[in-house]
């Protein structure tokens, strides 16, 4: 059963089942030529909100020690998730520019009008920044307790390894957050590379 917090903006209701801190383990399985990347990792993910119409996101992953291989920090991510909607004069930005009009409180009916006309879910976007110099803009859909995302843009710093596209899937299954992450990296096309099962800890 999904519990919806009472103190969140209407725009966050479709994403409210994500709110909290999730921890668990996952597996890596990705091949590039003769190299096989594999192992088990611990994972901690946090979704929170501070009153705005978006979720704050942070995540860390650490490869678990195995045999002679020590534990290794893999990546940290931060970002923001929100329903996709057109910018209006009621929204601040870009940068520190204030809004040009007073904000009209949005209702559940306003949000419901954003649902896809074919009866599907709500369009969403997520902006993620990785500690290894990669930034991603994802677009996708939340439909009940399931989210499907695909990159619309990927930006890499000069020191980042080749990484060109990704998809992610998140789902709430029997109270656990399950996710799978496919990537196109190091010259290989889009393929499965990691998945995890997380439990809410707070």
Image: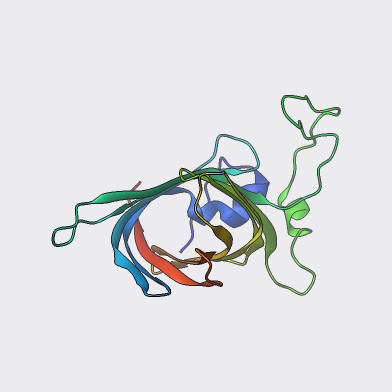
Relative vertical location of residue 89 with respect to residue 25 in this rendering, above or below: above
**121 or 112: nearer the viewer:** 121
| Residue at x 39%, y 69% (from the top left corner) | 174
**147 or 64: nearer the viewer:** 64
**3 or 197: nearer the viewer:** 197
Q: Is residue 189 left or right of residue 153?
A: left
The N terminus - image quarter: bottom left
Relative vertical location of residue 40 with respect to residue 15 in this rendering, above or below: below
| Residue at x 28%, y 50% (from the top left corner) | 72
One can see residue 58 in this view: no
Colour mode?
A: rainbow
Quarter of the figure with residue 117:
bottom right
- Extreme-left residue of the structure: 67
Relative vertical location of residue 69 with respect to residue 180 in this rendering, above or below: above
One can see residue 147 in this view: yes
Quarter of the figure with residue 105:
top right
Q: Position of residue 26 (x, y in %)?
A: 33, 64
Q: Position of residue 109 (x, y in %)?
A: 76, 54
Total marks in image: 0
**60 or 188: nearer the viewer:** 188
Q: Position of residue 68 (x, y in %)?
A: 14, 58
Q: Position of residue 136 (x, y in %)?
A: 60, 52
Relative vertical location of residue 171 with respect to residue 82 in this rendering, above or below: below
| Residue at x 73%, y 73% (from the top left corner) | 119
């Amino acid at each position: 059963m999904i519990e919806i917090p009472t103190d969140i903006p209407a725009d966050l209701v479709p994403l409210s089942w994500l709110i909290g801190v999730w921890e668990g383990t996952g597996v890596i399985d990705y091949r590039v030529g003769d190299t096989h990347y594999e192992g088990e990792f611990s994972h901690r993910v946090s979704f929170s909100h501070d009153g705005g119409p978006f979720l704050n996101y942070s995540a860390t992953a650490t490869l678990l020690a195995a045999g002679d291989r020590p534990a290794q920090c893999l990546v940290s991510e931060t970002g923001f998730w929100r329903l996709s909607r057109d910018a209006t004069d009621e929204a601040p930005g870009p940068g520190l520019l204030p809004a040009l009009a007073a904000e009209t409180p949005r209702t559940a009916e306003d949000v419901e009008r954003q649902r896809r006309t074919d009866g599907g879910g709500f369009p969403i976007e997520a902006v993620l920044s990785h500690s290894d110099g990669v930034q991603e803009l994802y677009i996708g859909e939340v439909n009940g307790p399931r989210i499907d995302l695909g990159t619309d843009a990927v930006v890499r710093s000069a020191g980042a390894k080749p990484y060109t596209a990704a998809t992610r899937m998140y789902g709430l299954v029997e109270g656990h957050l399950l996710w799978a992450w496919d990537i196109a990296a190091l010259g290989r096309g889009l393929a499965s590379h990691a998945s995890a099962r997380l439990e809410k800890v707070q």
